[in-house]
Amino acid sequence: MRRGDLPRRPTRRFFRQDAVRVARGLIGATLVRVLPDGERLAGIIVETEAYLGVRDRASHAFEGRRTRRNESMYARGGTAYVYFTYGMHYCLNVVCGGEGEPAAVLLRALEPSEGQDRMREHRASGTRRPAGHEALCRGPGNLARALAVDRSLDGVDLCTSQTLFVEIGSPVPASRLRRTPRVGVGYAGAWAGRRLRWFMRDSRCVSGR
DNA sequence: ATGACGATTTACT
DNA sequence: GTAAATCGTCATA
């Protein structure tokens, strides 16, 4: 982005690509959350994972599973898919591909860039020590909590929403990225080993393991 | 109606 | 390293 340019959102065309391209392409972009009171929270996306749809055993849509929970995975690319897991955490995904094609990218970590105090408040309750800047949005559950993302944002269209959206960032060269298997999908057999996780090599905000 | 299970996080030995 | 927290969702009956 050049000086004086306004931030731009990725096009619908971008989100309609396959999840591998979207996962790779979102690294370095900024995720923006505008709270009900108008405060803007934002962070640079530093870690993503691709879930490839009906053939991917780790995906919620494996073998065409379609339920109330994962319904928004079947919406068109650019839709938010927010699910609740482990009885306490929300996770935010970006749906990819065309309508009826349930692929998605899980957003796993951000480097906070705006509204860090508010993020810290959101993270505060339940933890003993306040999270440092690096840890505010480290891990999908923490990211969602810091940005006040819950099921009310499930199904939101990131291409048009004023509440939750993405802004294009500077291009990230491949040399700054690392690619590994996904986290927490050991149950997925051969799919567990596929390198479908991307993260910024030098970022201190990336989740562990 | 019941039971098993998480695309996680934290705390603790 | 292991375990606990915690509950919506889904498959089974």
Image (cartoon, coloured by chain):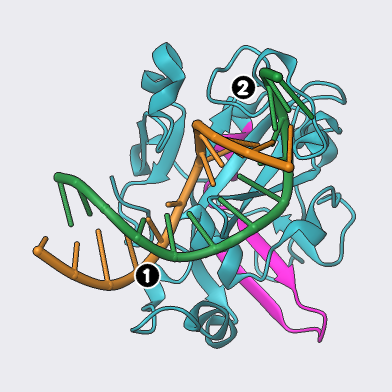
Chain colours: A cyan, B orange, C green
Q: Is residue A83 magenta?
A: no
Q: Is residue A31 magenta?
A: yes
Could you say where residue A158 lies in the image, as x and y percent from the top left?
81, 51
Q: Could you tell me which secondary element the residue under label 1 belongs to?
A: helix
| Disc 1 target residue | A134
Q: Could you tell me which secondary element the residue under label 2 belongs to?
A: loop
Q: Is residue A153 left or right of residue A88?
A: right
Magenta stretch in the rendered image: A22-43
Q: Is residue A65 left or right of residue A125?
A: right
Q: Residue at x 82, y 37 (%)?
A: A68
Could you say where residue A162 lies in the image, as x and y percent from the top left?
86, 66
| Dot 1: chain letter | A
Would residue A1 be seen by someone viewing this image from the given angle? Answer: no
Query: In the rendered image, which quarter contains the N terminus of chain A?
Result: bottom right
Q: Residue at x 57, y 55 (%)?
A: A87
| Disc 2 target residue | A52
Question: In terms of sequence position, does the residue under pointer 1 or pointer 2 come before the other?
Answer: 2
Q: Do tag 1 and tag 2 residues touch (Cβ < 8 Å)?
A: no
Q: Please state which of residues B10 and A121 is positioned toward the viewer in this rendering.
A: B10
Q: Is residue A95 left or right of residue A108?
A: right
Up-down relation of residue A55 to residue A4 (above or below) = above
Up-down relation of residue A124 to residue A194 (above or below) = below
Up-down relation of residue A76 to residue B12 (above or below) = above
Quarter of image, res A63? top right
Q: Amino acid at mark 2?
A: Leu
Q: Amino acid at mark 1?
A: Glu
**Which-is-in-front pick, marks 1 and 2?**
2
Q: Please state which of residues A87 and A160 is positioned toward the viewer in this rendering.
A: A87
